[in-house]
Amino acid sequence: MRHVPTPVAIVATTAGGRPVGLTVGSFASVSLEPALVTFFVDQQSTTWPLMEDSDTFTINILGHSKADRCRSFSSKGIDRFAGVDWTASEDGDPILAEASVVLECSKHSARALGDHVQVVGQVQKLHVLSEDLPLVYHQGSFLNLDHLVSA
């Protein structure tokens, strides 16, 4: 599957009054009406159990220059929000200042599929914060989209 390019996002919520988030490399649009999106989380994740009971979350789409932020949100044993500029959505979920696009979602469903959990969210609000090219992962590294060719 490493040959399939995927957009990179940080999914975030609050748990116990604290921000919690993780990097996902499997984000996709599911439906336009209603507006549904999906992402997948490894069942071995130590962060997902902190997030799974939340009814709301944000999906922070990163710009192509934010690979370091992506890495920090996939690191274990650190405060992933240390030094991160963010504001709270109306539901209290983190909106990262570094994100290009943020989707505020309510949880539609979550179910185990193979070795992952598929989470489907219903988009309640969408914020375009910048027009940066997206951060895309492919074959073990991030793509440089600076030379993107228009169709």
Image: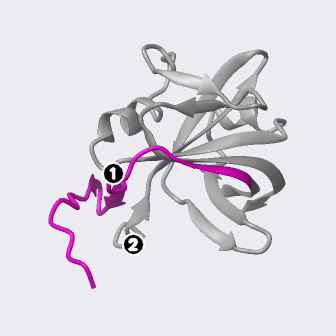
Mark 1 or 2 closer to N-term? Answer: 2
Give how far apart the Cα atoms at labels 1 and 2 are. 21 Å
List x then y, in percent, for residue 99: 45, 40
Residue matched to label 2: 4
Which stretch did the figure color magenta?
A: 124-151
The residue positioned farthest toward the left in the image shown: 147
Question: From the viewer's perspective, is residue 4 above or below residue 140?
Answer: below
Residue type at mark 1 is Asp
| Element type where label 1 sits in the image | loop
Which quadrant, please, contains the C terminus? bottom left
Scheme of image coloration:
one colour
Q: Nearer the viewer, residue 102 or 42?
A: 102
Question: From the viewer's perspective, is residue 68 above or below residue 81?
Answer: below
Residue at 71% over, 40% down: 57
Front position among marks 1 and 2: 1
- Left or right: 44 with respect to 85? right
Residue at 47% over, 31% down: 97
Q: Which class describes the residues within 10 Å of circle 1: few (<14), some (14-19), or many (20+)?
A: some
Q: Quadrant of residue 139?
A: bottom left
Q: Is residue 133 magenta?
A: yes
Residue type at mark 2 is Val
Q: Which class describes the residues within 10 Å of circle 2: few (<14), some (14-19), or many (20+)?
A: few
Residue matched to label 1: 132
Q: Nearer the viewer, residue 36 or 140?
A: 36
Q: Taken as a whole, is the magenta stretch helix, strand or loop? A: loop
List x then y, in percent, for residue 109: 83, 57
Which quadrant, please, contains the N terminus? bottom left
Q: Is residue 117 magenta?
A: no
Residue at 66% over, 56% down: 116
List x then y, in percent, for residue 6: 43, 63
| Element type where label 2 sits in the image | loop
